[in-house]
Image (cartoon, rainbow, N blue to C red):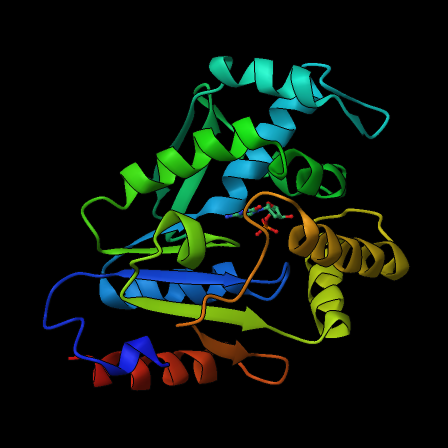
Amino acid sequence: MERCNDDARKGKKIVIAVDGFSSCGKSTFAKAIAARLGYIFIDTGAMYRAVTLYALDHGAIRSGMVDEEAVAALLKDIEITFRFNPERGASDIYVNGDLAEGRIRTIEVSNCVSRVSSIREVREKLVAMQQRMGRDRGVVMDGRDIGTVVFPDAEMKIFMTADPKVRAERRYAELRAKGDEVSMEEVLENVVSRDRADMNRAISPLRQAPDAVVLDNSRMSVDEQMAWFMERYEKMA
Ligand code: DC
């Protein structure tokens, strides 16, 4: 069922849930939609990354081993906030007042974030925060469980996917551009293992909501994706 074909919008601000696999370009797409509609864009993956970074910095992850109890115990000390950065046209994430935007996107964080995001206490804290942030609608939220758990009543749900090789190539280019000395094999392995971990975890696994529309952007430019979106969005008016 294409939920966005019905008349749910009627001129009111809505919640747009963008879920899907890692490195699909969800954030780029969600950010572009938010800018177009004047909505707030919320990158929920950044929130799981921020907790992972804090756990790395505070000894709850050592040599790639995640101590789940230690991560859960740290949660009370972590305050996550977003501040709009006009240069990026999106919000930067801060952990306890410190800018964390660049540091959350390293391969070290990427390698541990799936484990951290499978911890019940972490999900409970971040889901509650996300629900508060979208309480007044007018948000585009990207993640894995937005249309299924965070906002099961989202008026529009998009499930994004793309060929794993295409996704790894995109992530590889991004990391190399930042000077990260990663190999293509390492990035592809990270993409594939995160897909597996995200789909198979016990709590809130990555699933396509039954009322989500699928967007496979393997061979689509950002402009083509926007055109795809606007066609559906305008039908809701
Ligand atoms: O979108 P991303 O790659 O930055 O997300 C980082 C990790 O966080 C990803 O491996 C899965 C997890 N995640 C999640 O479990 N639930 C969300 N709503 C968003 C991200």
Of 105 and 178, the residue lying toward us: 105
Tell me what residue is drawn at x 31 percent, y 76 percent: 3
* 194 to 1, vertically: above or below: above
Query: Residue 87, can we see it?
Result: no
Of 118 and 42, the residue lying toward us: 118
* 100 to 16, vertically: above or below: above
> Which part of the image, by quadrant, shows the C terminus?
bottom left
Direction left: furthest residue: 11
| Number of numbered labels in the structure image | 0
Tell me what residue is drawn at x 44 percent, y 71 percent: 210
Residue 49, x across and y down, in percent: 59, 37
Query: Residue 169, can we see it?
Result: yes
Q: Quadrant of residue 35?
A: bottom left
Q: Quadrant of residue 80?
A: top left
Tell me what residue is drawn at x 64 percent, y 28 percent: 53
Question: Seen in the image, is 136 located left or right of residue 225?
Answer: left
Tell me what residue is drawn at x 56 percent, y 65 percent: 25
Question: Seen in the image, is 86 located left or right of residue 143?
Answer: left
Residue 145, x across and y down, in percent: 48, 53
Residue 21, x across and y down, in percent: 62, 62
Residue 8, x across and y down, in percent: 18, 72
